[in-house]
Image (cartoon, grey):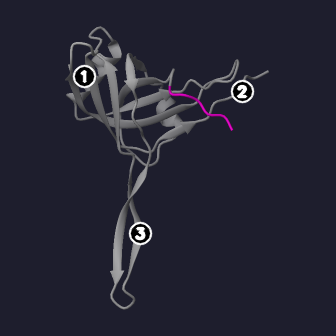
Amino acid sequence: MTVYSSAGLQIYIGGVMAQGDDLTLADFTTPPQTWVQIKEVEAAGSVGDTSEAITFTALDDSRTRTIKGPRSAGTMEIVCGIDPDDPGQQAVIAAEKEIHDYGFKLVFNDAPAGGTPSERYFIGKVMSQAEQYDQANNVMKLNISIGVNSNVVRVARAEATP
C-alpha cells in the first residue's frame, strides 16, 4: 500500500460549466478548459459524496429503517495566504460574485517516475471568499468555500509509457 502527503497538491479553477448527470473526464476536456492555479494554498479541505439519511418507522414492528437519500459532495474549504497578484485567487474572488458553477481540478503529488499524477475534477459554486487577518505573527489568509455541485471525477495516476 502506498500513501502520500497533501504536500504538493495543486488546485485549479476553470471556466463556467453547466450541471448535469454524473460527469466524466470528457466533460472537463471537451472542449478543453483553461485552468488557472490557485496559489499559496495552505489547506484544501475535502470533497466527496455523502448520502442524506431518510428514516421511516413502521408502527407494527417499531423498527426505524434508514434509506439512502440524495447525495451531496459537500463544501470544500480552502485556506490560502493572501496574494493579491495571484491570478487564481483573483479568479476565485470574481467567481464568488457570479451565480454560475465553475470547473475545479485537483492535481496530486503522487506521480510515479516519468508518469502522471492522480487528478480530481468537479464543478461547484464559489460560495464565499473572506479575508482573515488574525494576530501580528500570522499570515493573512483568504478563506474560500466551494459548494460542490457534481460527482467527483477521479483520474488515477499512471506509470510512464515505454
**Cβ atoms under marks 3 and 2 closer than 8 Å:** no
Taking the spot 51% from the left edge, 39% from the top edge, the residue there is 153
Local crowd size for mark 2, using a 10 Å CA cut-off: few (<14), some (14–19), many (≥20): few
Which image quadrant is residue 69 in? bottom left
Principal secondary structure, stretch drawn in magenta: loop
Give above or below for 38 relative to 52: above
Is 93 on the left or on the right of 70, as rendered?
left
Farthest bottom residue in view: 60
Amino acid type indicated by mark 1 = Ile
Taking the spot 40% from the left edge, 18% from the top edge, the residue there is 36
Q: CA distance from mark 3 to mark 2?
A: 40 Å
Q: Secondary structure at mark 3?
A: strand
Give above or below for 65 relative to 74: below
Q: Position of residue 130 (x, y in %)?
A: 21, 26
* Pointer 1 residue: 93
| Quadrant in the picture for the C terminus | top right
* Pointer 2 residue: 159
The tag earlier along the polypeptide, 3 or 2, is: 3
Taking the spot 33% from the left edge, 88% from the top edge, the residue there is 59
Q: What span is in magenta?
A: 1-6
The tag earlier along the polypeptide, 1 or 3, is: 3
Q: Secondary structure at mark 2?
A: loop
Badge nearest the viewer, 1 or 3: 3
Taking the spot 34% from the left edge, 76% from the top edge, the residue there is 56
Quick check: can you spot residue 66?
yes
Asked whether 143 or 94 is in front, the reply is: 143
| Quadrant in the picture for the N terminus | top right
Q: Position of residue 160 (x, y in %)?
A: 73, 22
* Pointer 3 residue: 67
